[in-house]
């Protein structure tokens, strides 16, 4: 967990999630990834925001669903 970093809810086999992982990795953007297909707790958390991934929750509380204009 990176303090002050966005939390990103993803799926392992989501092309849009993979795009986010690749782009943010290339840009050096640190984030905490929570793969909802690997944890019921993380799935329950994600569903409070949306039923589509990726879901980005920024430290200031702002929530963004999707990445690069796409939702997985």
Image (spheres, grey):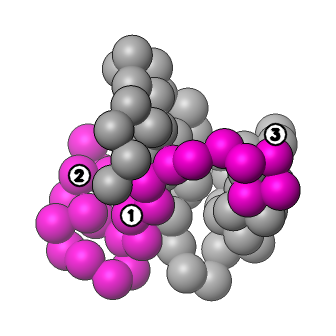
Q: Is residue 61 magenta?
A: no
**Crowd rating for badge 2 (residues with CA inside 10 Å; few <14, some 14–19, many 20+):** some
Count every numbered label the image shows and give the total: 3
The residue to which callout 3 is attached is 69
Where is residue 67? Give x, y as percent: 72, 44
The residue to which callout 1 is attached is 34
Closer to the N terminus: mark 2 or mark 1? 1
Q: Is the C terminus in the top left, top right, bottom left or bottom right quadrant?
A: bottom right
Look at discs 2 and 1 and give the one toward the viewer: 1
The stretch in magenta equals 25-49
Closer to the N terminus: mark 2 or mark 3? 2
The residue sitting at 66% across, 44% down in the picture is: 29
**Crowd rating for badge 1 (residues with CA inside 10 Å; few <14, some 14–19, many 20+):** many
Secondary structure found at label 2: helix
Residue 47 falls left or right of residue 72: left
The residue to which callout 2 is attached is 45
Residue 2 falls left or right of residue 52: left
Secondary structure found at label 1: strand
Asked if labels 1 and 2 touch by Cβ distance under 8 angstroms, the answer is yes
The residue sitting at 26% across, 63% down in the picture is: 42
- Tell me the distance, in whole angstroms, between the alpha carbons under discs 2 and 1: 10 Å
Residue 29 falls left or right of residue 44: right
Where is residue 71? Give x, y as percent: 68, 52
**Crowd rating for badge 3 (residues with CA inside 10 Å; few <14, some 14–19, many 20+):** few
């Amino acid at each position: 967990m990176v303090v002050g970093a966005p939390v990103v809810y993803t799926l392992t086999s989501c092309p849009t999630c993979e795009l986010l992982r690749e782009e943010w990795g290339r840009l050096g953007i640190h984030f905490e990834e929570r793969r909802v297909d690997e944890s019921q707790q993380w799935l329950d958390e994600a569903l409070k925001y949306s039923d589509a991934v990726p879901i980005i929750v920024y430290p200031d509380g702002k929530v963004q669903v999707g990445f690069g204009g796409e939702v997985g």
